[in-house]
Image (cartoon, rainbow, N blue to C red):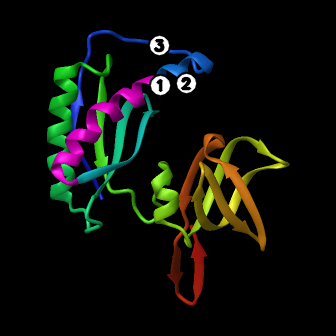
Amino acid sequence: MLYTNHVFEVDVVERWARGPFFFIMEEALLQKIETLASPVLHQMGYRLVEREFLNEHGQWVLRLYIEREADEKLTIDDCQKASHALGDLFDVEDVIQRAYTLEISSPGINRPLRYQGDFQRFAGAEIRLKTRYPIGERSNYKGTLEGIENSEIKMTVDGMHFVIPYDALLRAHLIKEIAVGKQKKMN
């Protein structure tokens, strides 16, 4: 599910180099967006799952993944309501100083796991996880999430138990099986 409504234009054309400074600026922007968006979404009965600010084919896109707090199915009307509320908020706060498109979407079957509560909520699920730096000799994990305790993500990969510091997390998401004919495909 995806709802795109707002396209914002800015007179200033900025060129940011893709380097460490860019990623620090991008993270600061995403943190500001999260700080503004989360309380508004909460009032509407939604929860922010993930946020991205990407340049796709020369167009900047702010993509926010949301879900209902009551774990009910998210509808396109929900996405539309959130888009209007957040688009107006971002306009007033003048958060992004460039032209961009705001997209509001459900997280889908491969839901990102970002907050510590996500790792407790989805204990027992199959996940993929990537760390910012190697833990031991690995950065990529695919296995069963056991949960999180004391800011340490616990999971089992091929029968081996791993403990990954939450601060080392780069990204993680659920893996769902999709039945295609008689074969199962892991996403």
Q: What is the C-alpha distance between the residues marked 3 and 2?
A: 13 Å
For the magenta stretch, what is the residue range?
26-45
| Callout 3 touching callout 2 (CB < 8 Å) | no
Question: Which numbered dot is residue 15?
Answer: 3
Q: Quadrant location of the C terminus?
A: bottom right
| Label 3: which secondary element | loop
Q: Which residue lies furthest to the front in this view?
A: 150
Q: Residues within 10 Å of mark 3 (few under 14, many from 20)?
A: few
The mark closer to the camera, 1 or 3, is: 1
Residue at the spot 36% in from the left edge and 34% down from the top edge = 61
Q: How crowded is mark 2: few (under 14 residues within 10 Å), some or many (20 or more)?
A: few
Report the side of 143 relative to 80 (left or right).
Answer: right
Dot 1 amino acid type: Glu
Residue 41 x/y as whole percent: 23, 45
| Label 2: which secondary element | helix
> For mark 1, what is the residue?
26
Residue 143 magenta:
no
Quadrant of the image occupied by residue 17: top right
Q: Which of marks 1 and 3 is nearer the N terminus?
A: 3
Residue at the spot 15% in from the left edge and 57% down from the top edge = 77
| Callout 2 touching callout 1 (CB < 8 Å) | yes
> For mark 2, what is the residue?
23
Quadrant of the image occupied by residue 126: bottom right
Asked if 152 appears above or below 98 in the picture, the reply is below
Report the side of 86 relative to 35 (left or right).
Answer: left
Dot 3 amino acid type: Arg
Asked if 9 appears above or below 55 in the picture, the reply is above
**Residue 59 seen anywhere in this rendered image of the structure:** no
Dot 2 amino acid type: Phe
| Label 1: which secondary element | helix
